[in-house]
Amino acid sequence: MSTSQQTGRNQTRIEADPNLPTITITREFDAPVENVFRAHTEADLVAEWLGPRDTRMQIDLFDCRTGGAWRYSAGAGEETVNFYGSFHEVRPNERIVQTFTFDGYPDGVSLETMTFEDLGAGRTRITGTSLVDSLESRDMILASGMEVGVVEGYEQLDELLPTLS
């Protein structure tokens, strides 16, 4: 199962291995790896780009270091949802390993690994893999409309990255 969304010259690829409870998201950015990593690790920057365009982000906790934790809420209109997790490994400009939990489904913890690859010429590729507890959980996530948040979030990150120096 695979989908790709065109966003400018860069595509967001969302793939699900039919035999494993994983989702892999791959995206390239026209920005140096240091800036892409920074946008993933500084709370004020994360709040600017993460999620769909019509969503308000509120970062309640963002201690982005190995052993740290995070919590944020996101909402559109009257509805607000909460997410939380912990950072298991933060390796600057290379890798982030964290857990991700939706408050509404606390038994559905996913383990997420994101790698940052310097492509040269000021370009970066990120690859994020989420591992969940079952194929059913993975399919629920895919059916939730998560691709809208991922694609629109990365479009917003495209807009933010040129402002970082």
Image: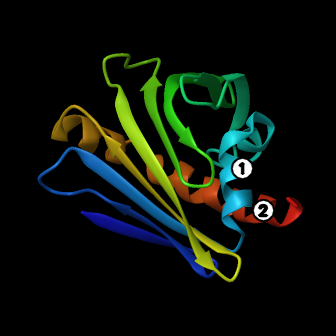
Between the C-alphas of marks 2 and 1, the distance is 8 Å
Determine whether the residue tagged by mark 1 lies in a helix, strand or loop. Answer: helix
Q: Identify residue type, mark 1.
A: Ala
**Residue at 69% across / 30% down in the picture?**
77
The picture places residue 121, in percent across and down from the top left corner, at: 68, 83
Determine whether the residue tagged by mark 2 lies in a helix, strand or loop. Answer: helix
**Residue at 71% across / 65% down in the picture?**
158
Q: Identify residue type, mark 2.
A: Leu
| Tag shown at residue 161 | 2
Q: In which image quadrant can residue 157 be found?
A: bottom right
The picture places residue 95, in percent across and down from the top left corner, at: 51, 49
**Residue at 30% across / 66% down in the picture?**
2
* Residue 145 in sight from this viewpoint: no
| Tag shown at residue 39 | 1
- Image: 154 above or below 69: below
The picture places residue 5, in percent across and down from the top left corner, at: 48, 70
| Tag shown at residue 90 | none
Q: Is tag 2's residue or tag 1's residue first in the polypeptide sequence?
A: 1
- Image: 13 above or below 129: below
Instruction: State left or right for residue 62 relative to residue 136.
Output: right
